[in-house]
Image (tube, grey):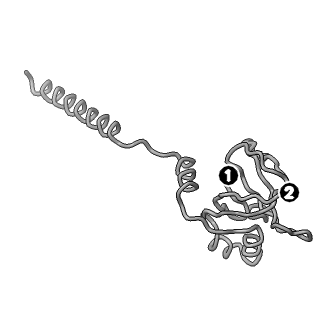
Amino acid sequence: MTGARKWLLGTVGFFAVLALVVVVAVELQPPMKSDEDVIRERLKTETLWEATPSNLVNDYRSSEIRGDKNWKGKLVRLTATVDSIRRTHDGTNTPVAIVHTLHADVNPDYVACLLDGEYDLPIGPKVVLRCIVGGLQQGVPTLGVCRPE
């Protein structure tokens, strides 16, 4: 066997072994959780911060930076009154509950809650939602992945 053939067979053999190692390594890795799965897991297991629309609005109204520092990314238990249910206009058609502070007859503080599914939330009475605070969007505190308790 010539030197060139030995080199060629050695190179092919090396890459075949390398490919086998990569396939085995990929197969042995645990499946990756999607962002949605991670968020849903947080909603089930993580400690909740108690919040009302007024808490969120007041912090964000005083300073968006303070609001983000105090709330953004936190899992909250939001107690509020549902004002209306709408859908986003961003192509996802996500249901959004517009909620406000309980018993706020004059100038209620509104918060937008992106719902995690098609929930039949009552308009008017008190609701309790688990949500993750997303921050300020178009001047309104917005919470994502919300679901009723």
Quickly name the residue at label 1: 147
Q: Residues within 10 Å of mark 2 (few under 14, many from 20)?
A: some
The one of 142 and 19 positioned closer to us in this rendering: 142
Please state, as top left, top right, bottom left or bottom right, where the N terminus lies in the image.
top left
From this view, report whether residue 94 is shown above or below residue 5: below
The one of 62 and 2 positioned closer to us in this rendering: 62
Is 85 situated left or right of 130 in this image? Answer: right
Q: Residue at x 69, y 59 (%)?
A: 143
Is 108 situated left or right of 69 in this image? Answer: right
Q: Position of residue 134 (x, y in %)?
A: 66, 61
What amino acid type should be assigned to the residue bearing mark 1? Arg
Quickly name the residue at label 2: 124
Q: Residues within 10 Å of mark 1 (few under 14, many from 20)?
A: many
From this view, report whether residue 62 is shown above or below residue 140: below
Question: Which badge, 1 or 2, is on the more N-terminal residue?
Answer: 2
Q: Residue at x 84, y 53 (%)?
A: 123
Which quarter of the figure has residue 23? top left
Q: What separation in Å lies between label 1 and label 2 (alpha carbons)? A: 17 Å
What amino acid type should be assigned to the residue bearing mark 2? Gly
Q: Residue at x 30, y 37 (%)?
A: 22
